[in-house]
Amino acid sequence: MRAWGYLAVLGVLLSMSLGCGASAGSAGPGGAQATAQGFTQAVSDGNHAQACSLLAPDTKAQLEQGAGKPCRVALAEENLAAADAFENIATFGTMAQVRFAGDTVFVTRFPRGWKVLAAGCSPVPEKPYDCRLQGG
């Protein structure tokens, strides 16, 4: 799957936030990082039900609709690469980009906590990120 529209805007905003030293404020980036790491660890462990519980509602719905299967089955079939060591996090308001060696995960904050908006993302020069898993 390709994440063009909103991930392009998110990428620009995150780039700006890196230059401005923006932070997520009272929510802090720790929850975003923990969610992204929990998701990548669950995928690596083959615990796709747990990984699905960390997906944003639109992301989960799009995955299920596209595959015509329940989230845990569809996610297993995505064959997302294992994310290695955490590298850094950039936050902008209620969104964050969490970078690992070998993967980038985009998360957003909902009233009940952070959720994965897109995963399996890699940068494309002069274009938005290309993401294997993403929501609407």
Image (cartoon, helix red, strand yellow):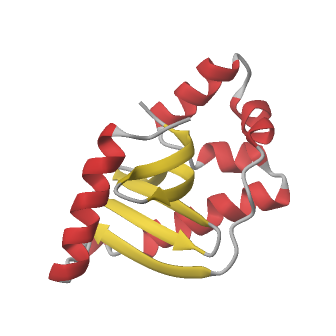
Which one is nearer the viewer's eye here, 109 or 92? 92
Q: Residue furthest front?
A: 125
Q: Position of residue 92 (x, y in %)?
A: 25, 65
Give the left or right position of residue 125, taking residue 23 as reference: right
Q: Position of residue 121 (x, y in %)?
A: 54, 54
Residue ID at (72%, 39%): 75
Give the left or right position of residue 94, taking residue 79 as reference: left
Please say if 16 is above or below 4. below
Residue ID at (48%, 34%): 57
Which one is nearer the viewer's eye here, 36 or 28? 36
Please say if 26 is above or below 60. below
Residue ID at (29%, 54%): 10
Q: Answer with the quarter of the image where residue 89 lies.
A: bottom left
Q: Quadrant of the N terminus?
A: top right
Please say if 131 is above or below 100. above
Give the left or right position of residue 74, taking residue 3 as reference: right
Q: Position of residue 135 (x, y in %)?
A: 46, 35
